Amino acid sequence: MNLQQRSDFYALLFGMWCASRRNKKIRNGLELCVEKLVSEIEKLLDDGRENGITKFNPEECKEKARTLLALPEGIAYHLLVNPDPVNLEDKKFWFQIRSMMLTVLKKKIFT
């Protein structure tokens, strides 16, 4: 689980975001990294769609990739601010996350 094994990464990520607000070069680098990650998620979603695992309009792929990326980033942010409220070992917590991700994959993001 990346949130547990690499929690320092998220501290670095949010630190870079803060620095990117003051430095255009850092902002450009951070934007490039995020776009690369979104592209990788898009490829996974396209593979799943092409192999019949998921069904959605191909034009929705980028929005779905961004939404799927935002969910763990949001969880990480909350853990950085206050690590106590979320027990990462709690299966009920991950069931809710799984349900949210499946909802993103099954429904249109924008109507």
Image (tube, rainbow, N blue to C red):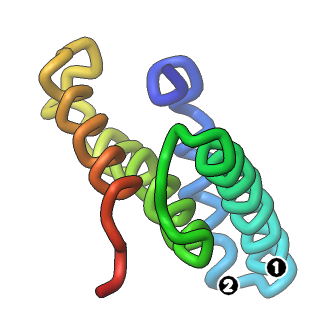
Q: Is residue 35 left or right of residue 57?
A: right
User: Measuring 34% from the left and 55% from the top, which residue is drawn there?
Assistant: 106
On screen, residue 2 above or below 53: above
**Amino acid at the residue labelled 2:** Arg
Spot occupied by residue 54 in the image (x, y as percentages of width and height): 49, 46
Q: Which residue is mark 1?
A: 28
Within-10-Å neighbours for mark 2: few <14, some 14–19, many 20+: few
Q: Is residue 47 left or right of residue 24?
A: left
Q: Is residue 108 left or right of residue 42?
A: left
**Amino acid at the residue labelled 1:** Asn
Within-10-Å neighbours for mark 1: few <14, some 14–19, many 20+: few
Spot occupied by residue 93 in the image (x, y as percentages of width and height): 18, 28
Which image quadrant for residue 15? Answer: bottom right
Q: Are marks 1 and 2 in contact (CB under 8 Å)?
A: no
Spot occupied by residue 102 in the image (x, y as percentages of width and height): 33, 45
On screen, residue 60 above or below 2: below
Q: Residue furthest front?
A: 52
The disc placed on residue 22 is: 2
In the foreground, 51 or 111? 51
